[in-house]
Image: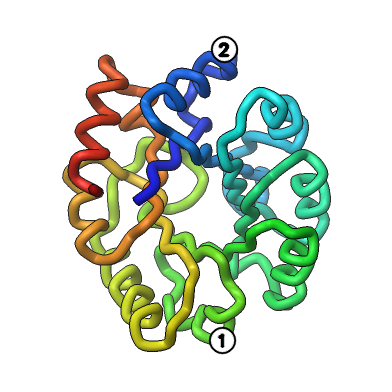
Amino acid sequence: MIIAPSILSADFSKLQSEIEEVESFGAHWLHVDVMDGHFVPNMTIGPVVVSSIRPKTKSILDCHLMVNEPAKMIPWFLRAGADVITFHLEAVENVTGHLQMIRESGKKAGVSIKPATPVRSLEPFLGDLDLVLVMSVEPGFGGQGFMQESLEKVKWLAEMKRTKGHSFLIEIDGGINPVTAKACRAAGVEVFVAGSSIFGAKDRKKAWEELEAVIR
């Protein structure tokens, strides 16, 4: 099981030390929330940030593109040093073409879905995915409450892996804490994106250990 701290919740005035702190707890994935102010009503991290932290960490940089026209941005993030690039199903028409663009570069490709999007919309593409990201909050802002209905999507994805032999990782993002993570783990989640529950905790190491304890 993987915990992927979301650097959106970190203190950007000391981003390197924030990353080093969670890596000292055992993090080897970092989740990078990319928002363009159009697909979601917020703007966050661009490829310049990714390229600046790439030489400073050996962690997997898991870039989640919450953007319109991801085909324009995928090459930027590939050059910046992303290891995993996930785009939204709702933002594209040619899913296969976007996946090929990422995978031909030797990087991992994922697709994410918003809470209102039926998970079965992903079925035609499951064999080509390295990761499926289920949003358990509305994308765009950190610190939201977990949507319980996302667990049914996770269960369906886990069943598709079991019965069809797919190898994609199931990732969840939004409202993850020790209580919600335990339910997610039981449903089949393998990658847990955690932002404010770690970076916003008074005792971050304790918060990490409590989250880790329920997903192992």
Q: Residue at x 45, y 63 (%)?
A: 169
- Rendered view: 177 above or below 19: below
Place of residue 118 in the rendered image (x, y in percent of width and height, measured from the top left)? 43, 77
Place of residue 114 in the rendered image (x, y in percent of width and height, measured from the top left)? 47, 63
Residue denoted by label 1: 124
The first of marks 2 and 1 along the sequence is: 2
Considering the numbered disc 2 on the image, is that residue within a helix, a strand or a loop? helix
Which label is found at residue 169?
none
Type of amino acid under label 1 = Pro
Q: Nearer the viewer, residue 147 or 213?
A: 213
Residue denoted by label 2: 14
Q: Residue at x 38, y 82 (%)?
A: 160
Place of residue 193 in the rendered image (x, y in percent of width and height, measured from the top left)? 41, 45
Q: Nearer the viewer, residue 17 or 117?
A: 17
Position of residue 110 in the picture relative to residue 193 (left or right): right
Position of residue 109 in the picture relative to residue 8 (left or right): right
